[in-house]
Amino acid sequence: MLYKPVIGLEIHAELKTKTKIFCDSLNDPDEKHPNMNICPICLSHPGTLPVINEEAVKKVIMAGLALNCKIEKNTFFERKNYFYPDLPKGYQISQYLKPLCYEGYLDIKSNPPSREASEGSKRIRITRIHLEEDAGRLYHLPDKDYSLVDYNRAGVPLMELVTEPDFETGQEVRDFTSELQMIWQYLNISEANMEKGEMRVEVNISLTGADGKWGTKVEIKNLNSIKFAADAVDYEIKRQTELLKAGEKVVQETRGWDESGKATFSQRSKEEAHDYRYFPEPDLPPLEITDKQIE
């Protein structure tokens, strides 16, 4: 039996702004000393209030326009509730119901071409691009029973792009992410240096059989290289195909990529859907985007 890969991407990029998304702390990815660019707002001290960084909003709108997106003129921020040590508030200010940009696309080289795109290209649909805050960094020390937290990155403006499951090969993933990186760098939206964590790729992949039903989804996280993302996709297609041909089941799980072994590896099995309990951020007013601002 032939299996068709169904692949979608989630791509995060830190925006190139002078300050963080909700405060005046510097957005400096080159800061080597921990906990230097911090303040009571990005550390979520009681009584502090966020103020939106207008430049961050503009850069997300610019990214949306470059990727043929519609722009949401009436939007708002929401609280995405989950606890992690490098997220001081216990929730992330993000967007869910009304992302700033939606229903876009990017054409990449392809053979055979898709019907929607020009000859020799394939259209990758973009579901949404939204704005949120980044978390800090955890440092896990060898031979220690504790970790350290650096909050320099907490509150950095973060843009998340989600595609439709339109990819079928690692090469398509490589072409799309390479083109995306060049667009963001050319427009000065993001430095998008993957080795610095300024651009991060996550892959969702399953295989469809002859009945057309999607198979079990596997997520590959923490891909900090375009090459790693493409290689991980090609390996995972092969791994899942071999499992299915042997009559075994693909387990729903989160996997990582081992570059030295050229293979994905299991990180978390049977991951359940999280209830993030989204609700409108009460400390930020709704955003109204005008035609003049878009122009």
Image (spheres, rainbow, N blue to C red):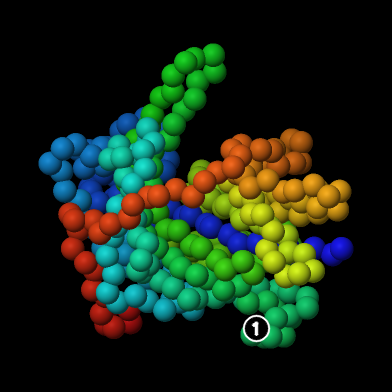
Residue 102 falls in image quadrant: bottom left
Q: Quadrant of the N terminus?
A: bottom right
> Quick check: 133 above or below 84?
below
Foreground residue among 74 and 291: 74
- Mark yes or no: residue 268 visible: yes
Apparent side of residue 212 relative to residue 100 in the rendered image (left or right): right
Q: Quadrant of the C terminus?
A: bottom left
Regarding mark 1 in the picture, which secondary structure is present there? Answer: loop
Q: Residue furthest left?
A: 47
- The residue shown at (25%, 80%) is 290
Q: Which residue is mark 1?
A: 117
- The residue shown at (59%, 42%) is 270
User: Which three-letter amino acid code belongs to the residue tagged 1?
Assistant: Ala
The local crowd at label 1, few if under 14, some if 14 to 19, many if 20 or more residues have their Cα within 10 Å, is some
Q: Position of residue 18 (x, y in %)?
A: 31, 52
Apparent side of residue 124 relative to residue 134 in the rendered image (left or right): right
Q: Position of residue 249 (x, y in %)?
A: 75, 48
- The residue shown at (42%, 79%) is 70
Q: How many marks?
A: 1
Foreground residue among 256 and 54: 256
Q: Position of residue 71 (x, y in %)?
A: 37, 76
- Mark yes or no: residue 152 visible: no
Foreground residue among 56 and 50: 50
- The residue shown at (73%, 60%) is 207
Apparent side of residue 103 relative to residue 111 in the rendered image (left or right): left
Residue 32 falls in image quadrant: top left
Residue 153 falls in image quadrant: top left
> Quick check: 2 above or below 110?
above
